[in-house]
Image (cartoon, rainbow, N blue to C red):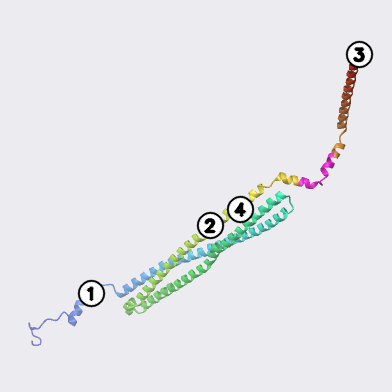
Amino acid sequence: MERGGTPSLSRPPPSRGGAGGGRWLVSKETERTPSPPPSRRAAAAMMMLGRGLDARDNQTRQIQDAVSNVEKHFGELCQIFAGYVRKTARLRDKADLLVNEIYAYAATETPNLKVGLKNFADEFSRLQDYRQAEVDRLEAKVVEPLKSYGTIVKLKRDDLKATLTAKNREAKQLSQLEKTRQRNPSDRHIIAESELQRASLDATRTTRQLEETIDNFEKQKIKDIKNIFSEFITIEMLFHGKALEIYTAAYQNIQNIDENEDLEVFRSSLYPPDYQSRLDIVRANSKSPLQRTGSLKSSLKTVQISSSTTRKNEEEEEEEEDEEEEEEI
């Protein structure tokens, strides 16, 4: 073909894969199906990261509130239970003093009362051994676990601190990412492919750590509360069951004291052995005038009766003698 002439029919048309044709086709497809520009994708990704940060902020506050609540109330429970144990130990000491005083008093009393008080003191002293066991068990099973929760709370705060550090680093990275995007708009596709992906991975890992931290903390807290209060109830039931048994025996020992026998022993201890015979003599010689008059009258009456009886006997004898004389005549 000559220049300026009609194009030859034998010349092949421009290839679709050629440079000029290819550019033209791509531009046409881009115009037909437009995709979001890299700036919009980066902004959407950063918006999602921002929402994730807000959600993690709420989780962090919940964990902080839970840890602070446990730290406050577990500390109060520990102090109150420790005071309970100290007062129980003081009650044991006072009971020991009471036992010693009962022993000292029983040594001065009458036999039955002495035995009863001594048996009571023995039972009461045995109860204090169980009270000592109660104190030791409460200290080991209740107070110490609550006290060790101070260390557990400290460890959870360290976990929170690490999580907050990661969250702050993520927020700082996101802020720097936004500033870089605004300063260098031409590099937006590079930011979307590298920094945003790294920030997203850090956010996912931080979220998982937060969820595991709060889940493990709550699980351990509930388990510890159940164990501590179950141990407290078991210890108190064991002690009070033994206390009821021992108090029953102590009550029976007191009821077995023979009051009348001890009273006789006491009365006999007030007088010497020959006091009763002398007392009878004194009573015989210390009658009142009325008693004396009555005795005199009874004596006179007795004399009169005996005199009349004698006289009657004499008359009967005389009559018998007269009858015998008449028979002889």
- Distance from disc 1 to disc 2, alpha carbons, whole Å, reads 78 Å
Task: Choose the circle earlier in sequence order: 4 or 1.
Answer: 1
Task: Locate residue 25: give its quadrant.
Answer: bottom left
The residue beneath circle 2 is 234
The residue beneath circle 1 is 30
Mark in the foreground, 1 or 3: 3
Q: In the picture shown, does residue 241 fall above or below 154?
A: above
Task: Choose the circle earlier in sequence order: 1 or 3.
Answer: 1
What secondary structure is the magenta-colored segment mainly?
helix
With 161 as the anchor, is 127 left or right in this view? right
The residue depicted at 58 percent of the width and 62 percent of the height is 136
Q: Which quarter of the image is occupied by the C terminus? A: top right
Q: Disc 4, disc 1: CB below 8 Å?
A: no
Q: Amino acid type of disc 4?
A: Ile
- Distance from disc 3 to disc 2, alpha carbons, whole Å, reads 121 Å
Q: Label 1: how many residues lie within 10 Å, few (<14), some (14-19) or many (20+)?
A: few
- Residue 78: image x %, image y %? 56, 63
The residue depicted at 62 percent of the width and 60 percent of the height is 89
Mark in the foreground, 4 or 1: 4
- Distance from disc 4 to disc 3, alpha carbons, whole Å, reads 104 Å
Task: Decide whether residue 276 is among the magenta residues.
Answer: yes
Task: Choose the circle earlier in sequence order: 4 or 3.
Answer: 4
Task: Choose the circle earlier in sequence order: 3 or 2.
Answer: 2
Query: Judging from the image, what secondary structure is the residue with disc 3 in?
Result: helix
Q: Label 2: how many residues lie within 10 Å, few (<14), some (14-19) or many (20+)?
A: few
The residue beneath circle 4 is 246
Query: Judging from the image, what secondary structure is the residue with disc 2 in?
Result: helix
Q: Nearer the viewer, residue 287 or 6?
A: 287
- Distance from disc 1 to disc 3, alpha carbons, whole Å, reads 197 Å
Q: Which residues are magenta?
A: 266-280
Task: Locate residue 294: give its quadrant.
Answer: top right
Task: Choose the circle earlier in sequence order: 1 or 2.
Answer: 1
